[in-house]
Image: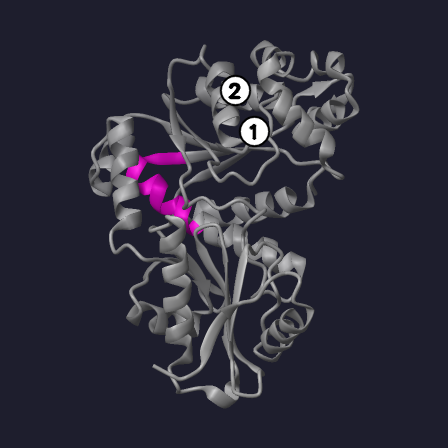
Amino acid sequence: MSDYVISKIYPSDRRGNAQVDELLMREGIRRDANLDYTCGMFDDDMRLIATGSLFGNTLRCMAVDSAHRGEGLMNEIVTHLVETQFARGNTHLFLYTKCDSAVFFRDLGFYEIARIEGQIVFMENRRTGFADYLKKLAQVSGRASDPCAAQRDGAAQKAAALVMNANPFTLGHQYLAEKAAAENDVLHLFVVSEDASLVPFSVRRRLVTEGTAHLPNVRYHDSGPYIISSATFPSYFQKDEAAVIESHARLDLAIFVRIAEALGITRRYVGEEPFSLVTGIYNRIMQDELPRHGIECSVVPRRQADGAAISASTVRSLIKSGDLNALKPLVPETTLRYFLSEEAAPVIRRIRGEENVIHY
């Protein structure tokens, strides 16, 4: 243990935050946009020599000044961050790191979930965390937890997957689910459970299940911490936004392939994306990668209303402007009923208070 002190760096601490930015830059890391806690280790002259941050249940933006390598300072930073998380009540922790640093974090009790060679490794502090998640998915689906058995069963039953954020659930989402359910024996519908959207997860999941209740072969799954939204995927290792999108897509697909093996999924459905740059790039990578693992990628043209593709961004824009009557041709009756109810008032206020509700 060193004699250096680790302390919290508050957002108002301009000098401390400037030192964090400088240290991260020297170590080839960009400050992530999504951070809710940052700490620093300072020498006797109050120069920052190590730093680390948190967001939700993840550890992020960790760096040690090159002049202090080999002193065990990163161990102390990680220990401090883990203790802070435990004090918050977060015990299942995740981190992203460069490939050449994965061995170091393995020695600190983190286990690899998936990696993109030369780019990033996704890790957690539970040895069987992801394996337990796969077993739970198989149990909910009434399938064998053994991937080999799942593949054998899949030969007799066509199983497809659909992953949606549904922020909120629209007629476009419903059309996609209906098509996938009609063309397969079983549809595994994953709702992104990370609460990084204007519409909370509890509401999104309810609107999805209500809007697809007429489809008897749908199996619903929460994405849990393993299907990561683009809103909270770390950007600090990549040189630009396009690289962030690509590495997020490839990491997410590496995880999805293992989910597909466990559930016997041989087809994934996605909506055609005329609006979102992020989703457009993601879909392109998905079309390239999934067939290499024996999974068909089916891109479905968007359902339209008045000659324009239906999108959740359009729905949020109408809610923001207060034009709830214009939602009728864009959302199922169940979604419309929710937004016309008093229960939706806090969500509507949140959407109206947001400066930009269109996500690219």
Compared across the picture, whether 122 is left or right of 351 comes to left
Where is residue 257? Give x, y as percent: 39, 46
Q: Is residue 259 magenta?
A: yes
Q: Residue at x 52, y 85 (%)?
A: 43
For the question of whether residue 343 can be seen, the reply is: yes
Q: Image quadrant for the C terminus?
A: top right
Which residue position holds label 1?
166
Q: Looking at the picture, does residue 184 appear above or below residue 9?
A: above
**Residue 260 figure quarter:** top left
Please provide the residue range marked out in magenta.
254-266
Nearer the observer, 84 or 199: 84
Nearer the observer, 118 or 32: 32
What is the spatial separation of the Cα atoms under label 1 and label 2, in whole angstroms?
8 Å
Which residue position holds label 2?
207
Q: Residue at x 43, y 59 (%)?
A: 95
Q: Main secondary structure of the magenta part?
A: helix
What kind of residue is marked 2? Leu
